[in-house]
Image (cartoon, helix red, strand yellow):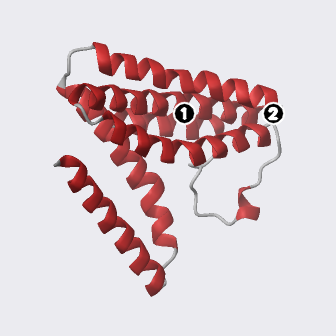
Amino acid sequence: MLVFFLADKFICEFTGKEHEHSHKKDDEKKTPKTSKTRAAAYLNLIADSLHNFTDGLALGITFVQGSGITTAVAIFFHEVPHNLADFAILIENGFTAKQALLAQFCSSMTGVLGCCAGLVLPQQQWMFSFVAGGFIYVSTVSILPTLMEDRGAISTAYQVLAMCLGVYMMLLIAE
């Protein structure tokens, strides 16, 4: 978690921007396109590369343990909207569509490196800790604050149901 926390802090400090999941209204978040916003796009790519490496590491580790297909499906459903959002961030920060696709492709290749590391390196406790820390950091910093914004009873019930379903699915996979 510390690696992800420090990467997030560095990105925010270097770009002068708040975390991408800030609670400001959309019109308050808009910033002019400057070299700082272009730098934010590059730093987003660096953070995404670390994220992709972690996903690849999780894939490699779970394929060695025999549950890689399940992890691959979970990562696929997570990565499609994530990469679309990253593509939009790059376009918004001055990249052309071709440049954004190439940058996303290069960033995604760190996932292949992570997968190779997970497959080849002897299974170490730090690998599990690193992957788990990354997932815990993302959920506590990005997901939970977003869930807390909507305080309606029906919405909360759906959120609790979704969380319970997620835990149930993890229990099914673990068996």
Question: In this view of the protein, which residue sits in the foreground, 66 or 44?
Answer: 66
Nearest the eye: 37 or 123: 123
Classify residue 163 by image quadrant: bottom left
**Image point 31% across, 21% down: which residue?**
118
Q: Is residue 174 left or right of residue 74?
A: left
Q: Amino acid at mark 2?
A: Ala
Residue 138 in the image: state x and y as whole percent. 42, 47
Q: Quadrant of residue 98?
A: top right
The residue to which callout 2 is attached is 97
Could you tell me residue 103's position as x and y percent?
68, 25
Secondary structure, mark 2, is: helix
Res 48 label: 1
Circle 1 crowding by C-alpha within 10 Å: few under 14, some 14–19, many from 20? many
Report the residue at 67% width, 35% height from top.
Answer: 40
Q: Earlier in the sequence, mark 2 or mark 1?
A: 1
Specify the amino acid type for callout 1: Asp
Q: Residue at x 64, y 64 (%)?
A: 24
| Residue 131 shows up from this direction | yes
Q: Is residue 167 above or below residue 155?
A: above
